[in-house]
Image (cartoon, coloured by chain):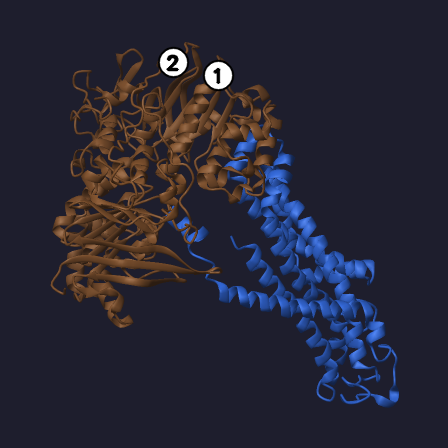
Amino acid sequence: MSGERGLRVDGLTVAYETARGPVEAVSDVSFEVAAGETYGLVGESGCGKTTLGRALGRHLPRGGAITGGRVSVDGTDVLALAPAELRRWRASSLAVVHQEAGSALDPTMRIGAQLAEVLRLQGRTRREARMQVPRLLDRVRLPDPEAIARRYPHQLSGGQQQRVVIAQALAARPRLLVLDEPTTGLDATVQHEILGLIWALRAELGAAVVFISHDLALVGRLCDRVGVLYAGRLIEEGPAGEVLATPRHPYTSALLASAPQLGRTRRTHPLAAIPGRPPAPGEAGTGCAFAPRCTYADDTCRAGLPPLDMVSGRRTVRCHHAANLIDLSHDGPAARAEPTAVDGGGRLLEIQGLTRHYGGTPVVDDVDLTINRGEVLGLVGESGSGKTTLARAVAGLGPQGSGVIRLDGRELAAGVGRRDARIRRAVQMVFQNPDASLNPSHTVRTVLARARRSLRGTLAPGELAARADLDAYLLDSRTDRLSGGQKQRVAIARAFAGDPELVVCDEPVSALDVSVQAGVLRLLADQQRRTRTSYLFISHDLAVVGYLADRIAVMYRGQIVEQGPADDVLAGPHHPYTASLVEASLAPLGKADAYAVGDVTAKDAVGCRFAARCPLRVDGLCENEDPPLITLANDHTVRCHLDATGLPEATALEGET
Amino acid sequence: MTTSVIAKGIVPRISRGVGGRSRVALAVGGTLILAWAVIALFWPHLAPYDPVHQDPLHRFAPPGPGHWLGTDQFGRDTLSRMLAGARPVLQVAPLATALGTLAGTVVGLVAGTFGGLVDEVVMRVLDAIVVFPTIIAAVLFVALSGRSVTAVVLVIAASFTTIVARSVRAATLVEREKAYVEAARLRGERSWSLMLREILPNVTTTVLVEATSRFGDAIFAAATLSFLGLGQPPGSPEWGASVSDNRTWLQIAPWTVLAPALAIASLVVATALVADALRSRWEAP
């Protein structure tokens, strides 16, 4: 045994102490990860992914304990180590990267000092450590390592912080690297880069890598093997490519079907959310834990726990019907293409020359934008591009500035307080953070009743809730008792309380799990189809925007660099920045270097804002002169110096074939 | 996302030890306060002697049978005076706390919700009150209006108003920025409706925490004013005044000072225990 390399987990069981006695959060989990291999652990929130990740290094939160099984890393039995040995083992063999890089770094220490500390724990002398720091920073592709080493964490961007944490992990030369949602909350392009980095470093590292995520597609691109975790148990396991292409467990296929993909829209591929939620630890009955949510479940499923069966040489599935459910193709009812029905109602919202400043910096800079009646306009851009400020300006919130917003040809006052009741009814908003968008002291009924009264709506709270697919029993729950997805449904129901003409959706699904997100997107699509309300829909996720939008506008550092019909914008020819976004969500990992993140803090007033990051830059022109607005086709405009033939195009989008 | 799940459900209430401690604190503090409240109401039936009755033959009698806590310089029974002293304190403290909390909540809510010029003016006025030492204000006020329970209550309530208003304003500012308030503004809710229906329910924890903390302060403040001779007329069995009157005789009759001092301490500690326990309950997610 002691000669084997990599991670080996055998029957690992973790329980938490609760008022009702101990409950199992992870039950009898076994898998192996060879050195140099990447293993993905996937599942919804609350399925035990994080607990499992923590148990591997034996750093469970208080109240949790490993009650059974074995964890061995390169032959070392981790669970048998005495406290002092465990500490030494962690220092020499374990590295963990968590979701929030910012909180993993000491805000009072310079980056260089923090890295040197890790090296010193390895037994390096002070001088050796200092010498190695720039080399480490260089390995995680941070520009100007010497300067970065002198900075404090808060002086770095989220992506840079995550790189530093990865550099720390590298410095430890671990035998086991646990990555717990390392890119959640980062922009698409940054996420792509970080994943590419991890992908590139894994061979060099030679460690067993465990990658935890709720995003199955992401795991599929990064990992050699995946294990799907549900209610604390592995329910499917196998080579990543095979599991994603031909899922054998209904849960795996449902997870895949709930994730939006580029090239699949609400008209051709309506998303299928998984009904219900995973059981909390201790809640699952005797049968298959997924049975209550499974469309294939029968009495066998409810009666007994299915065994983990080997279905082929390298794949295991925990399902009573694994042998029968061969065809779980996750394509869903394909290509039931409704007519792209923008019902010719003309322009609803016109924005001209809109400019908004925060502390002297233009966040929204001379933006022109049009939304037609009955149309969903998707606004995409990375954080800091000004898309939220633009959305809030439309709703009448946030700082004031110059520019004109017209609704139905009538100019709107900049502040919501000076808009009349008719306009307030017409323009409503769904906010990003579900926890803040509902009054936590009110019940769902109160929230909806207050909205109905002040918006003079006609539908009763019960009716509004029903239209948002909210169960009637939730009406009298306080909103702070609801899950994130339920809160967003209430927020949507509230926005529709008074027959709005335009609903501004500011990243309404970015805080939600993939499976919950699908349901909320579906609801937004259904409401839109029923009411013909126009949306200004904002997201940093191109796949989400592509799913919902009829037209797409791309925002970069305060400017709209491209807008046009969704298909044209995604397929190209399009702006080089749009190309980078499309590539980030489609291209294989390790190809991201073309669009390296430039210095986003630069505030150059002249020239194309994207010039520093653009691989198609025309030197001497792009950084000195403002690019012209060129019209490519009907209603498709791009702000670029290149002409239509020079602009990049997306290589065949999946789903169009 | 993951961390929030841990906080909400998967990790059980591991703080059982803390919870148990807070239960004990609540029980001990609550019992003490209740006991003093009963004494304040029924001391005429409980006190062995009339607290103002002078017995020149038994001056400075040490604690023992007959006088369980001894007598003072005029031969008055220390135990009876201690029991009788509970009433003025427990009249002043709840009233002052309630008044100060109420006024502070209104001022803080208005300043926080309306912001701008209203906030500016209100906060500068509060600043002006804060920089004026409470004791001097109290001396002035009592000198002008005469010694009375009302005067003491008003002085303490005024100084509490500034403290409570600041906390409530801070909490209001936090809530005001949240999306649910913006959603209400998008619907055209009026400011007073925003303030009372949307914001107030979400700052009640702050208000309650302030009220419980202030209650202990109020007991101490009442005792201090009484010690300085700003309480009720001389001779009344007030705790602060008793400590002040008898401190000259501390060396020959320490019980005359210790009894009222311990009474003050026990009540202040009891309210602190209860306040802490309640706070950890209210502020728990």
Relative to A499, does residue A392 appear above or below in the rendering? below
Amino acid type indicated by mark 2: Ala
Question: What residue do we see at 63% from left, 44% from top?
Answer: B122
Q: Where is residue A120 in the image (x, y as percent from the top left)?
A: 20, 64
Q: In this view, does B234 lie above or below A542?
A: below
Q: Name chain B's colour.
A: blue
How far is mark 2 from mark 1, CA to CA? 21 Å
Q: In this view, does A190 lie above or below A545?
A: below
Is any atom of residue A404 visible in this view?
Answer: no
Task: In this rendered view, identify the residue nearer to me: B282 or A384.
Answer: B282
Q: Name the residue under label 2.
A: A341
Q: Which of B76 and A344 is in front in this view?
A: A344
Rendered brown, the chain in question is A
Residue at the spot 22% in from the left edge and 40% down from the top edge: A243
Q: Residues within 10 Å of mark 1 (few under 14, many from 20)?
A: some
The residue lying toward the viewer, choosing from B119 and A573, is A573
Residue type indicated by callout 1:
Leu
Q: Can residue A188 be seen in this view?
A: yes
Q: Which residue is label 1 attached to?
A: A407
Q: Where residue A402 appears, x then y in whole percent?
A: 44, 23
**On the rendered structure, is A407 left or right of B270?**
left
User: Label 2 lies in what chain?
Assistant: A
